[in-house]
Image (tube, grey):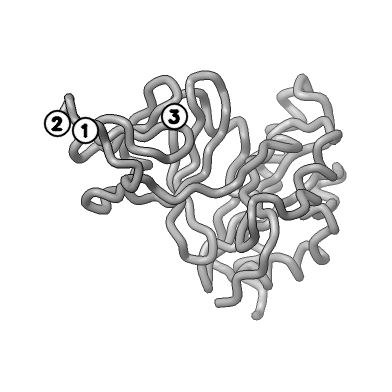
């Protein structure tokens, strides 16, 4: 599976509340998306370096995330800071997890994949000024390429504008694995958009998913 460099949306920002985490995938790689108590977002490899337990199964306290298995605690930079079985241990700086550059723009959490942290930040920066309301994330049994074709191609900022039940929405495609993808959908309207309109569009999303999954590859 090709893994093109770039920024990829991996979650709706509204779905990751402060002090929570969630697991996801990008090109088959397991990731944890978490938000600390202050609201900052983080995207890491979803694996505790100790025994390989998924960090997304753990818990967030302040600006640390802890593994559910043995409680190893990691700071916002991915460095292990505390091991409950050895509370007085000065933890080695070698014990750390892999982290990825991430940003929150246009109601979406983006991760930079396959490039150094100082690479251009075109996708999230281009989307920054768009006022949006989160709609929903669709998870499809279809490759990202098929999803992108069905949507008419991706925009230069990583977002595709489509018509959904008479309303314009923005879609970001996440390649989960070879035969699975996600579409994170936001509506370019103020966050206080009428609930009835958002509910109507959410229902239309289900029909969109079914039509894409049922399309001939």
Residue that mark 1 sits on: 83
Residue that mark 2 sits on: 86
Nearer to me, 191 or 88 = 88
Place of residue 165 in the rendered image (x, y in percent of width and height, measured from the top left): 81, 46
Q: Quadrant of residue 212?
A: bottom right
Against 104, is 122 above or below?
Answer: below
Residue that mark 3 sits on: 20
Circles 1, 2 touching at the beta carbon (< 8 Å): yes
**Mark 3: few, some, or many residues within 10 Å (few <14, many ≥20)?**
many
Place of residue 104 in the rendered image (x, y in percent of width and height, measured from the top left): 67, 36
Q: Residue furthest bottom?
A: 217
> Disc 2 to disc 3, how far (Cα)?
26 Å
Nearer to me, 87 or 38 = 87
**Left or right, 164 with reference to 112:** right
Circles 3, 1 touching at the beta carbon (< 8 Å): no
Question: Is residue 126 shown to the viewer in this render?
Answer: yes
Which structural element holds mark 1? loop
Q: Residue furthest left?
A: 85
Residue drawn at 43 percent across, 40 percent down: 78
Which structural element holds mark 3? strand
> Disc 1 to disc 2, how far (Cα)?
5 Å
Question: Is residue 206 shown to the viewer in this render?
Answer: no
Residue drawn at 65 percent across, 46 percent down: 110
Place of residue 214 in the rendered image (x, y in percent of width and height, measured from the top left): 62, 70
Circles 2, 3 touching at the beta carbon (< 8 Å): no
């Amino acid at each position: 599976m090709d893994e093109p460099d770039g920024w990829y949306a991996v979650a709706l920002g509204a779905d990751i509340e402060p002090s929570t985490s969630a697991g996801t995938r990008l090109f088959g790689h397991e990731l944890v998306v978490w938000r600390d108590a202050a609201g900052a977002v983080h995207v890491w490899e979803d694996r505790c370096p100790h025994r390989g337990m998924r960090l997304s199964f753990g818990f967030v306290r302040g600006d640390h995330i802890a593994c559910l298995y043995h409680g190893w605690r990691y700071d916002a930079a991915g460095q292990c800071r505390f091991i409950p079985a050895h509370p007085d241990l000065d933890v080695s700086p070698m014990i750390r997890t892999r982290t990825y550059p991430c940003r929150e723009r246009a109601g979406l959490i983006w991760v930079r994949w396959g490039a150094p942290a100082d690479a251009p930040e075109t996708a999230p920066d281009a989307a920054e000024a768009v006022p949006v309301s989160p709609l929903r994330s669709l998870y499809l049994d279809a490759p990202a390429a098929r999803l992108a074709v069905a949507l008419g191609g991706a925009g230069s900022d990583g977002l595709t504008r489509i018509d959904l039940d008479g309303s314009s929405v923005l879609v970001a495609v996440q390649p989960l694995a070879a035969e699975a993808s996600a579409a994170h959908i936001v509506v370019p309207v103020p966050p206080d958009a009428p609930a009835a309109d958002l509910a109507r569009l959410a229902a239309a999303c289900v029909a969109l998913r079914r039509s894409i999954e049922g399309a001939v590859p």
